[in-house]
Amino acid sequence: MGPTLAGEWKAEEQPPASFPLADVCSLTNAADPNNQYSISLGVLPVSAQDAAELRKYDVRRLKGHYVVQPVDGGVGQDSWAVDPAAAGPWVVFRSGNRLVKVSRPLGGKGQLNAVKAVARTIERLPGGFPPTRSMHRRPECERGTAAAEKLLAAKAAARRDTLVNGFVSCRWASTRQAAVAIGGGLGSDAAIAFTNLRNAGTGPVVSNRRVPVGQEGWQQDNGFLAYQLAENAFVTVVAHPMPSTQSAGVLALARALRPIHLR
């Protein structure tokens, strides 16, 4: 979509979005690095009913982070928009039965309108979206497939396994569910999540519990799990959506994948 926007833009591939499973790229304006957008394109086709369920998921997720509710997005089919005061806005819409999310990392006056303008540009692209492979597998992740598909209660319809900075991440998904394990080193999201869960588990208000995986593992009541394998190796494991009834299944997935993150 770069040629359809004014100015020069640099497109870069980013790690996949875990739920709903999506391929992601960033667009950055060459003249202004702060003028940046993240574009997510869903891997699997979704129906209007699927989109409605995913919007409900956004509502539940927002309750724990921002005092804001989604509103009608005004872009494409079944769209919604979110404009938090403390973060950049985003718009989600359905086009050609694929779910698209456009977001900005920075908030501020007029930013939601800018996001909507880019979303409309994407919606008008001639020819729709190119087809994409549903399966991108890495052999290391196969150790976790059986445990992941128990969490999905079905065969995975899509996969996005990646290797980033030497750490393997594995993602299995259906239209409305996903199972994800993401590895990382010091300073990574996995390391930050581990520190946060450990601090919460040992603080005055205990919101999670220690679990037997890796050198030290912690799991929230909603199933989200983070553990440390070595001084510079951390992993997060989660099922989306995050019902507490799947906590044991998330732990089983973490244990199944533990050997691949020790490499």
Image (spheres, helix red, strand yellow):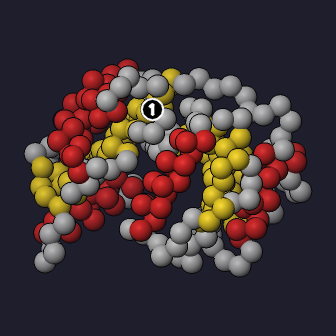
Could you say where residue 185 lies in the image, as x and y percent from the top left?
Answer: 35, 50
User: Depth check: 86 or 188 in front?
Assistant: 86
Task: Let me know if residue 232 appears in the view.
Answer: no
In the displayed image of the protein, which residue is found farthest to the front?
49
In the depicted structure, whether residue 63 falls above or below residue 254:
below
Position of the N terminus by quadrant: top right
How many labels were placed on the picture? 1
Q: Secondary structure at mark 1?
A: loop
- In-image side of 97 versus 140 (left or right): right
- In-image side of 249 versus 113 (left or right): left
Q: Quadrant of residue 87?
A: bottom right
User: Depth check: 260 or 130 in front?
Assistant: 130
Task: Let me know if residue 108 appears in the view.
Answer: yes
Could you say where residue 6 lies in the image, as x and y percent from the top left?
Answer: 89, 56
- Residue identified by numbered label 1: 174
How many C-alpha atoms fall within 10 Å of the one at disc 1: few (<14), some, or many (≥20)?
A: many
In the depicted structure, whether residue 199 falls above or below residue 55:
below
In the depicted structure, whether residue 111 falls above or below residue 93:
below
Q: Quadrant of residue 149?
A: top left
The residue under the point 49% across, 48% down is 53
Could you say where residue 202 lies in the image, as x and y percent from the top left?
Answer: 13, 69
In the depicted structure, whether residue 106 falls above or below residue 154:
below
The residue under the point 33% across, 43% down is 239
Could you say where residue 205 lies in the image, as x and y percent from the top left?
Answer: 16, 75
- The amino acid type of the residue labelled 1 equals Ser
The residue under the point 56% across, 72% down is 84
- In-image side of 62 versus 14 (left or right): left
The residue under the point 53% across, 76% down is 86
